[in-house]
Image (cartoon, helix red, strand yellow):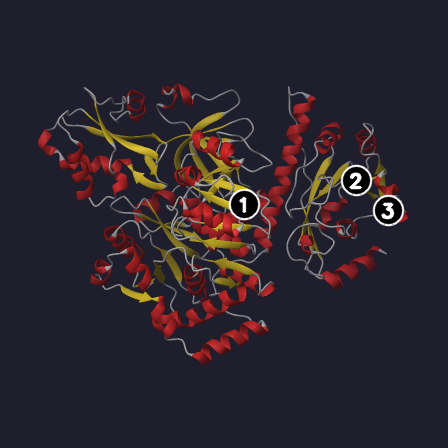
Amino acid sequence: MRKFLRWIVRFLYGFRAYNEAVLKTKGPVLLLPNHVSWWDWLLIGVCLEEDWRFVTSSTAAEASWIHRKLMVSRLTFPVDMNSPYAVKRMAEHLQKGGRLVLFPEGRLTCTGSLMKLFDGTGFLISKTHAKVITAYIRNAEHLPASRAPGKTTWFPRLSVHFSAALTPPEYQDVSATDTRTRLTEWLRDKMVLQKFETELEFGAPTVPAAILKSAAEEPRHLVLQDLTMQELNYRRIRIGAELLSHQWTRRFGSARERVGVLLPNVNAMPVVTLSLWMAGKIPAILNYTTGPAIMLSCARLSGLKQIISSKRFVDRAKLDLQPLKEQGIELVFVEDVRESIGKAEKLFAALRARLGLSVSDGGFQANDTAVILFTSGSEGDPKGVELTHRNLLANIWQMLSEIDLQETDRFFNALPLFHSFGLTVGLLLPMVHKVFVFLYPSPLHYRVVPSAFYNLNCTVFFGTNTFLSGYARKAHPYDFRTLRCLFAGAEKLQEATSDLWMRKFGVRIYEGYGATECSPAVTVNVPLRLKQGATGCFLPGIEYRLEHVEGIEETPAEKPTMHSQVGRLFVRGPNIMKGYLNPEANAKFQALGGWYDTGDIVEVDAEGFVHIRGRLKRFAKVSGEMVSLAAVEDALAAAFTKFGLKFSVAVVARPDEEKGEKLIAVTNEPKLTMEDVRQAVRARGLGNLAVPREIKVLSEIPRLGTGKVNHRLIEKLV
């Protein structure tokens, strides 16, 4: 019968099972799958030997004769889930060498993602010391027999992925209650990690392939909308990207090279980016707020010959692109390209899309560079970050494995797409996961954004502390009535902002932490694991280590609490960048052997939550943008040689309710004025965000024993 049923599910669903050999592990052993559909027992059962038993509810079996037939048999282990002796009976069976299948969620998921695990499973593991095998049932949430929201189909491709036989950890000098809780968390971490690793291995290898796969599965699904209120489904996106990809090949040639993209949050931006991938090109997304000097520096660093932009955008934003033209960089406007596409070409592209014919995804490999993003635009030599297709997809699946985002969600993205947070979380994740996203061109419209969110009935929103604080002050209390998930990143979330959102809207903010080099997310708070004041736990697949830093003990607030660790954070994982374009910065990164030095001092507490204590690299985040304190110091020091050799200056950052952080110039020269500071900063070509807000005068600039400026002591003094 098992062989016959397996043939049936193989025929109907293309069913495959991976690592089945582990199911021969001798008892006591627990098999713990995720629970996404009513057919899960069948998908697991066709892989098992005779002595395996499914744990079922004896009370639920009394509902009807069908329930009794299915839930009480020689293949099941019925127990009364409301009885305190249920776990005892299961434990006795396991201790005799038995093998049980138990769904630790205790119910079907209604999100498609892993829901909370009942700690009775942790208690059972602690009492029996049984081996544990986790199982990830893939794609069953798309069955009609599932309760997950989103589109269903009669015959999705299904598979089951079994882990190795795991030995649960043992906890010494810990109460039974704490042991049960820790084992339940350990199990959840293993199940989340298994989902992430499976999706990364068996999913599409590149970002364009993942988007085109979603387009092939649901071509009429609405996925994009911008301020013009133009709606784009997957079919229209595919047609537009295919037509543009042919134009890029004709204009730029077939060689794999970088092409600049200078566009705001409009529908054209993702379509152009996808079209460049389909043409085998690597988009280098430029920050249009940095000014012509920084943009030119980024273009040179990337070796750009062409930049794709929009006439309307350039005119409305009043961008000065003349320095780019003078350097021989060709500006290609999407309006001109669109007019050059013939009607016959449009017709054939639409016909191919309607027939579902395959289209080129650019021929990229997983470890090829997918996009170039730029960090530290306020420095003279900005660093270009190479993120691969695997980096981006890894970070997408890391977040989807932890957060219960649903296909019925509606994203609202006002963060610029040259920002890694806005690009990966606000655009690529919903496009891969078949989720609607509305693109808004500016995060600074504090009155308009809440109203637009309200009118669109969106459910997922994110931003920096500065922007979220602005929206909360200007919004009506009813504007965010449909908001289900609110995420904050890119700068420290102020307690005042969090309290304001809770009081005014009844909404919790889930703070995360990351960096462009990490694609960008590293940690995130989620409803299942939340701690105020922390930035969440590490995402699955990310390793970390902490290194001691000189002088860290000098700050009492940064002394480690019991069972916690404090130090300079290094992270490693599949989401960490390929490298920098800058040769010197890249050499330092490559020398670390895959580890990325965040430059941040963090505390990791006993529960695994990360608390950001300070930035060793001394980059301040002002209005969500990184500002180099060292670059500002250099500008001031170079400008004021008239004060003599004794002149000294340092720049520190302090919290600010409006901007997130503000810069303070600390000097031993009382004659230094704010006008002098502004002129010096602007003379170096740095933006307004790099101008210190005030000056503090000290009799002497304190230094460490090594001769370095003691910035931590300065922060105490100011």
Tag shown at residue 636 = none
User: Dot 2 lies on which element?
Assistant: strand
* Residue type marked 2: Leu
| Rendering quarter of residue 469 | top left
Distance, label 2 to label 1, CA atoms, is 31 Å
In front: label 2 or label 3: 3
Tag shown at residue 100 = 2
Residue 441 picture location, percent across and down: 39, 53
Residue beneath the point at 86% across and 56% down: 1
Along the viewing direction, whichever of 91 and 330 lies nearer the viewer: 330
In front: label 1 or label 3: 3
* Residue type marked 3: His
Determine whether 434 is above or below 518 in the image.
below
Task: Name the residue beneath numbered marker 3.
Answer: 67
Q: Looking at the image, which residue sits at the far bottom?
A: 344
* Residue type marked 1: Met
User: Dot 3 lies on which element?
Assistant: helix
Tag shown at residue 399 = 1
**Whether residue 588 can be seen here:** yes
Residue 78 picture location, percent across and down: 85, 39
In front: label 2 or label 1: 1
Looking at the image, residue 82 sits to the left or right of residue 388; the answer is: right
Q: Residues within 10 Å of mark 1 (few under 14, many from 20)?
A: many
Q: Residues within 10 Å of mark 3 (few under 14, many from 20)?
A: some
